Amino acid sequence: MNNIDIFNKIVNDERFKEEMNYIQHGDVSVYNHSINVAKSCISFSKKLRIKVNYESLVKGALLHDYFLYDWHDNEHEGLHAFEHPKIARRNAINDFGLSKKEENMILSHMFPLSKSIPRYKESIILCCVDKYCASKETITRNKIAREINDNKKIKFKRSIFNLSQLLINLNILAIILATNVLSNII
């Protein structure tokens, strides 16, 4: 199966579609966030010409938040930020099966909050891109709300652009550092 087949299989799966019922960041569903992350991981790795296993990259990225509950209601296991990677991994193994690389991608995507360390290029990319997408989704919602309620649109848009650029640069730096650490591990 190629990465397009894997993408289509997962996003069209009825259980995976349950993610549409849960909000992740701002007003973005977990389903849309997962798709944003998967597409951004592919784009990022291609732009930087990083050789990756695209099938694993797509699968791990789509399933990294496959926890299937509303994390805002506090009716779930432990603290969400620390526990959801384990729950997502368990659900993904049960419903789709995972390679060791894909397991590491899901378990380590919250690094450094999680105890699991990204051990593959795909894991590092997911970890950084997920943070970028989450920031962008949250900022975009705040931007829309601010534009409705504030007359200082131009100033706010500039600050959003600068913050987005900063986040992009920090994530690139994190990938460079993580790649250097990873090369010493392997």
Image (spheres, rainbow, N blue to C red):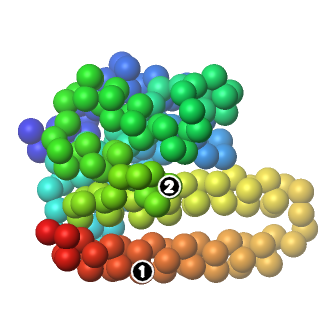
Q: Mark 1 highlights which residue? A: 173
Label 1 CA crowd tier, 10 Å (few <14, some 14–19, many 20+): few
Q: Please tell me whether residue 155 is drawn above or below residue 26 in the rendered image.
A: below
Image quadrant in which you'd find residue 54 = bottom left
The answer, for residue 125, to whether it is visible in the render is: yes
Give 167 or 31, whichever is nearer the viewer: 167
Instruction: Please give the name of the residue rendered at 79% of the width and 53% of the height, measured from the top-left corner.
Output: 145
Instruction: Please give the name of the residue rendered at 42% of the width and 80% of the height, measured from the top-left corner.
Output: 173
Question: Amino acid type of disc 1?
Answer: Leu
Q: Please tell me whether residue 168 is drawn above or below residue 138 in the rendered image.
A: below
x, y percent for residue 126? 35, 57
x, y percent for residue 180? 26, 80
x, y percent for residue 82? 51, 44
* Quadrant housing the C terminus: bottom left
x, y percent for residue 176? 33, 79
Left or right relative to 151: residue 68: left
- Contact (Cβ within 8 Å) of mark 1 with mark 2: no
The answer, for residue 32, to whether it is visible in the render is: no
Q: Mark 2 highlights which residue? A: 113
Instruction: Please give the name of the residue rendered at 84% of the width and 55% of the height, measured from the top-left corner.
Output: 148
* Quadrant housing the N terminus: top left
